[in-house]
Image (cartoon, rainbow, N blue to C red):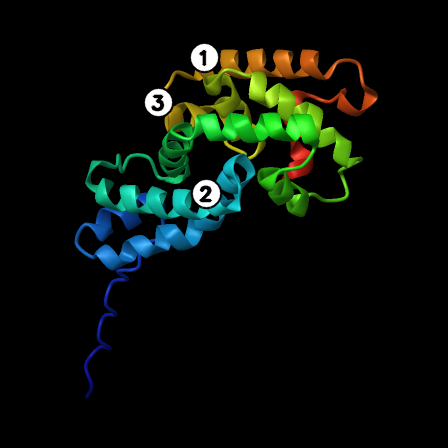
Amino acid sequence: MTGPPPRPEPSTSPEGDAEVVAQSLEQPELFARLYDRYASDIHRYAARRLGTGAADDITAETFLIAFRTRARYDTDRPNARPWLYGIAGNLIGKQRRAEVRALRALARTGHDTVAESWTDLADDRVTAQSAHAPLAGALAALPAGDRHVLLLVAWADLTYAEVAEALRIPVGTVRSRLNRARRKVRSALGADPAFTLDATEVAQPWTT
């Protein structure tokens, strides 16, 4: 008579982001799962803001910092996206002068390295290449905090709560910054029929 079949070993493969982070403290190789899940998104977002070359460095450093500080991650937060975008945003913020210079160059000439990466990402919703220049000028004129909130919503597709978590600011501050950015972009773009959409929707032609 044979005994009962052996009980299967419990799975040690974490599913949620918080579980990945927690288990990576004992099994560091598991942290690569977060890279696999989110690296392409972080890279795409950084490329839209600083160009492809800078995005490579931003992405690598984002995950290096995340790995080194993972012991401080709040595992009550199941989704690591805001955490990672917050790290990436801090790194992008250190290059805000480069970002503004690129935006102003695009506004003046309609051509620069960052603009090329945006053009590569454009799809059928782009009505004209000339749409990039005035929008770039409007974005360059925004305060850094307002621009960051606007682009996290428009390009990273974060919710207000996720932006608040990423930037460590109240949701009310996210709303006020976003509303202010929308008003300024809408005002800067004037009455051109091509720019009658909400400011975040105007930015969408650069998304995939």
- Residue 58 is situated, as x and y percent measured from the top left of the image, at 40, 42
Quadrant showing the N terminus: bottom left
Kindly identify which residue carries mark 2.
Answer: 54
- Quick one: which residue is furthest to the left in this view? 26
Front position among marks 1 and 3: 3
User: Label 3 sits on what residue type?
Assistant: Arg
Instruction: Name the residue located 61 percent from the left edge and 29 percent from the top edge.
Output: 105
Q: Is residue 30 left or right of residue 132?
A: left
> Residue 172 shows which numbered tag?
1
Answer with mark 1 or mark 2, whichever residue precedes in sequence: 2
Q: Is residue 107 left or right of residue 126?
A: left
Spatial distance from mark 1 to mark 3, Cα to Cα? 12 Å
- Residue 66 is situated, as x and y percent measured from the top left of the image, at 29, 42
Mark 2 residue element: helix
Q: Is residue 9 left or right of residue 175?
A: left
Mark 1 closeness class: few <14, some 14–19, many ≥20 residues within 10 Å: few
Tell me if residue 75 comes above or below residue 191 in the rendering.
below
- Residue 19 is situated, as x and y percent measured from the top left of the image, at 29, 47
> Residue 162 shows which numbered tag?
none
Please report contact status of discs 2 and 3: CB closer than 8 Å, yes or no.
no
Kindly identify which residue carries mark 3.
Answer: 168
Quarter-of-image position of residue 29: bottom left
Instruction: Name the residue located 22 percent from the left edge and 77 percent from the top edge.
Output: 4
User: Label 1 sits on what residue type?
Assistant: Gly
Tell me if residue 99 comes above or below residue 9 in the rendering.
above
Instruction: Name the residue located 58 percent from the left edge and 39 percent from the top edge.
Output: 114
Tell me, yes or no, if residue 201 can be seen here. Answer: no
- Quick one: which residue is furthest to the right in this view? 193
Spatial distance from mark 2 to mark 3, Cα to Cα? 24 Å
User: Label 2 sits on what residue type?
Assistant: Ala
Mark 3 closeness class: few <14, some 14–19, many ≥20 residues within 10 Å: few
